[in-house]
């Protein structure tokens, strides 16, 4: 396994980075669907993940991808 820097580890460990990764449209759709099943998540964190997924899905529709 490749070693990662401390800065990269901290960046990817932010909320949503590990529990709700969204590198593409499919992952954004899955994050939206599975958000209601998530445990130990505050309403603010839920809103943050939902907003990010919505932005990703809307951006993909505009660009036609």
Image (cartoon, rainbow, N blue to C red):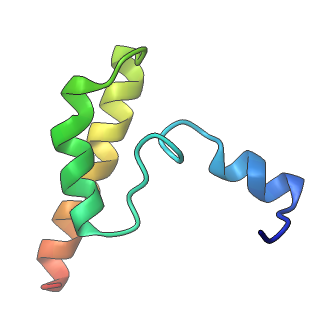
Q: Is residue 49 visible?
A: yes
21 left or right of 11 in image: left
As displayed, is residue 52 above or below residue 23?
A: above
User: Residue 24, percent across and down?
Assistant: 32, 69
Q: Quadrant of the C terminus?
A: bottom left
Residue with the most extreme front position: 1
Residue drawn at the location 40% of the way across and 66% of the way down: 23
The number of discs equals 0
40 left or right of 15 in image: left
As displayed, is residue 28 above or below residue 36?
A: below
Residue with the most extreme bottom position: 64
Closer to us: 2 or 13: 2
Question: Residue 32 occupies which quadrant of the picture?
Answer: top left
Question: Residue 5 occupies which quadrant of the picture?
Answer: bottom right
38 left or right of 7 in image: left
User: Residue 29, percent across and down?
Assistant: 18, 54
Residue drawn at the location 34% of the way across and 49% of the way down: 52
User: Residue 40, percent across and down?
Assistant: 43, 14
Q: Quadrant of the N terminus?
A: bottom right
Question: Residue 63 occupies which quadrant of the picture?
Answer: bottom left
Residue drawn at the location 22% of the way across and 37% of the way down: 34
Q: Is residue 54 visible?
A: no
As displayed, is residue 30 above or below residue 5?
A: above
Residue drawn at the location 70% of the way across and 51% of the way down: 11
């Amino acid at each position: 396994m490749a070693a990662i820097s401390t800065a990269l580890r901290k960046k990817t460990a932010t909320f949503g980075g590990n529990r709700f990764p969204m590198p593409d449209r499919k992952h954004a759709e899955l994050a939206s669907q599975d958000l209601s099943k998530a445990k130990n998540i505050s309403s603010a964190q839920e809103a943050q993940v939902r907003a990010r997924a919505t932005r990703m899905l809307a951006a993909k529709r505009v660009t036609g991808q």
